[in-house]
Amino acid sequence: MIRFPSVVILFWLLLSTAALADHGKGAVGGKTISPRTLHEEDASIETGFRYQRSETFSDDRLLNAAADGHDAHSVDWLAEFSVAGAYGVTDHLTLSVSLPFEVIHGFRFVENDGVNPPAVEGANSIVGMGDATMIGKVSVAADPVELAVLLGVKIPTGSTGQLDNAGNLLEPDHQPGTGSWDPLIGVAALHQFEAFSLGGSMLFRYTTEGRHEFQPGEQLTIATKGEVQVAGLGKFPRVYLNLELAYQWTAMDREDHLRNHDTGGTSVTLGPGVRVRVNDHVSLGASFSFPLYQGLYGFQHKERFEFLFGTGVDF
């Protein structure tokens, strides 16, 4: 068991070197947040990986969209690596912090300076630290349904100085970080049957203005997951199969207090997954999701699929 002073040091190290994770109790590799908290003075560390493949636009399509007044751009794929830690302050309160590192590949956009003819420019790889997230999870009920309230903040640790191939600063909505302090509020619930569990969570992000007079769109994420144990009843390793349905709404970004009508929208995704509880302390999880619906505002590239993988170690 890790005692309080060493865990405090660990948390600040993670904050300076560490995406929202589902800390503790082996719930990894998905979007649904578990309501379960750690025991007092227990801790957990998680690592995560997210790969998102996107629709790719040709140069001609980008130029035509820009000629129609759109903020046109295209991305091949995004990869995000994250590390997170959590600490049980009490049996009913867990504090967690997480930090992502992002790689955006194949970013292309239309440069129109009003002097030269519009042209497609690019940034082969946008690489940088993302914004940290700190969450407090408060357990308010345990029977018959486990229920927790989530309160937190997104901290502007992310990079906002990434450049394109020509050495020019990229627009704020294309940077790994936003520069804004954004409060978070939500709720998570879970009902455990004998070998099956059904859980759900809702998290809302209220945004503020960050660097370069940029304000990201508010975001609401609702996810639900059903999970069944298929192997390892009463012993290790334990294997679980799950299916997750997620809804996400994002408002339009604002820059100089003006809405960008080519940002934001609604998506619904469905993804099967697997989780393995190796022993009392170690878990692995993975899921593969694909969009059922994407109602994006304006001109935007759509997501083709997303792969999530996570590891968790409880102390």
Image (cartoon, rainbow, N blue to C red):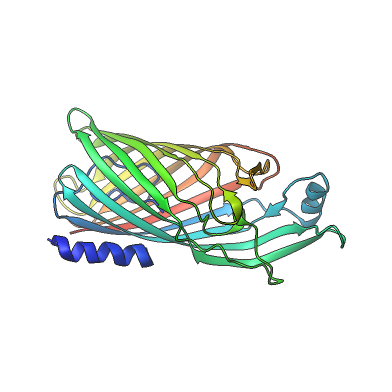
Instruction: Say how many tags the image has.
Output: 0
Note whether residue 274 is visible: yes
Q: Nearer the viewer, residue 97 or 277?
A: 97
Image quarter (top left, top right, bottom left or bottom right) of the C terminus: bottom left
Residue ID at (68%, 40%): 261
Q: Is residue 234 above or below residue 246?
A: below
Q: Is residue 138 left or right of residue 78?
A: left
Q: Nearer the viewer, residue 77 or 22?
A: 22
Q: Is residue 127 above or below residue 76?
A: below
- Judged from this view, the residue extending furthest toward the top is 144
Image quarter (top left, top right, bottom left or bottom right) of the N terminus: bottom left
Residue 11 sits in quarter: bottom left
Q: Is residue 14 above or below residue 149?
A: below
Residue ID at (67%, 46%): 300
Q: Nearer the viewer, residue 311 or 180?
A: 180
Spot occupied by residue 158 in the image (x, y as percentages of width and height): 48, 61
